[in-house]
Image (cartoon, rainbow, N blue to C red):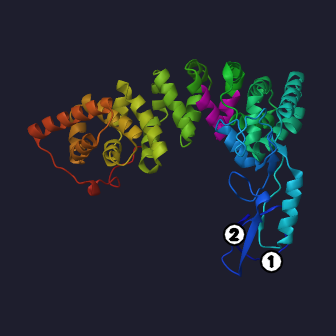
Amino acid sequence: MGLSLRMRRRGGAKKDILTPAISSSEEEEEIVIPSQFQCPISYDLMKDPVIIASGITYDRENIEKWFESGNQTCPVTNTVLATLEQTPNHAIRRMIQEWCVAKGSSLDRVPTPRVPISSHQAIEICGKLLSATRRGDHVVCVGKMVEKMKRLVQESERNTKCFKANGVGLVLCVCFNAFSVNANASELLEDVLLLLTWMFPIGSEGQANLTSTTSFTRIVGFLKSGDQNAAFLVKELLSLDEANVDKLAAINGVFDALVKSIRDSSSLTSIFHMISAKPVTTSRFMELGLVNSTVEMLVDSENSVCEKALLVLDAICESNEGRTIVRGNELVMPILVKKILKISEFAKKSLVSVMWKICKTGDGTEVEEALRLGAFKKLVVMLQVGCGEGTKEKVTELLKMMNRHMKTNGFVDVSDSSIEFMHLKKPS
């Protein structure tokens, strides 16, 4: 028996292994894929046939997913496997190749997959990189080892996992730290940063290498030039240990670099970590216009970015200085009110917290503005729909503040559709 597919016949010679394709034109043809060419898991034509310990052949991608799900048995025989190693089945591959060629141009070709690296190969590469690092030979590191690792990592996710499992992350951290003082090693360090984004978590020893004064200084240097990999590493390092906040804060130019790269969500998260763990950093960030930059990101950013921006704004509002500057931004309350019912539950928690902090500690003008913009009805809806206990308490208190203001002063309720930002002066 074989799998029957309707195919479209097209011109052009094919040389590699082929898979089914559909064209929008030309004559339709039915092709039956022989059962021995089908993966027993997906029943699709195998692209990269491999044999496992039970002797059964599968498509590599499908059997790897099976193993990654925690299975240690053969899907067909259900026998427990002595090893999860996979061996390329070149015989079946050649048969599939010949069959595809015989079918002419009815199928689309796919690139012949490269064989993933083994643990032995990963350890060997790792050892050579470490040896070159200890010799101080950055030319060999970047010209051979690091370039080879980049190519292998980009080839397949399995190669990346193999490198991670065999300690490459730590060696890369050692390499970065060793050459961080070398002014001529920028190309190497930039490539190592790229590789490290795939290697987290890196462990305490790797973290110690990356958070040394010379390493952090070099990472901040890349951050200043807009390097997204550097932004990612800073975020990861700050999330691992609060002690890294003090180390980073001591690096010259880091505050300016983070604010300038705030459009990168990694930098936004890093700023949140710094303000939360070290509130004294708030003043420095305020001087660089953090509030205005964060508020502007709330206007048109996607949901995930809004979540991070609101977290930062909430952290800023922990201090009197922060709340004062937030109140001084004319866009804040209109944006908060407009977004109450349009963001994720996680973001709503931060939004309500910001509104509660600036209203509770204000002189009443914030409550009046929120009422005028229609916040009362939206907060009532939010309470009816349901929210977390802490958020619920803040919403309730906000509604009580607004209710007292309505009874005392009256208010003008503005519908959602009339909330506009165009007439508001953008903060300088």
Q: Main secondary structure of the magenta part?
A: helix
Q: Residue 228 lies in magenta, yes or no? A: yes
Q: Residue 226 lies in magenta, yes or no? A: yes
At a point 33% along the width and 50% down the height, the residue shown is: 424
At a point 72% along the width and 52% down the height, the residue shown is: 40
- In this rendering, does residue 211 appear at all? no
- Asked if residue 312 is positioned above or below residue 61 in the image, the reply reads above
Q: Nearer the viewer, residue 92 or 322?
A: 92
> Outermost residue, bottom direction?
27
Q: Residues within 10 Å of mark 1 (few under 14, many from 20)?
A: few
Residue 5's label in the rendered image is: 2
Residue 255's label in the rendered image is: none
Q: Position of residue 175 (x, y in %)?
A: 79, 26
Q: Amino acid at mark 2?
A: Leu
SS type, badge 1: loop
Residue 254 placement: quadrant:
top right
Residue 21 placement: quadrant:
bottom right
Q: Which residues are magenta?
A: 218-237
Q: Which residue is mark 1?
A: 11
Q: Position of residue 335 (x, y in %)?
A: 35, 46
- In this rendering, does residue 390 appear at all? yes
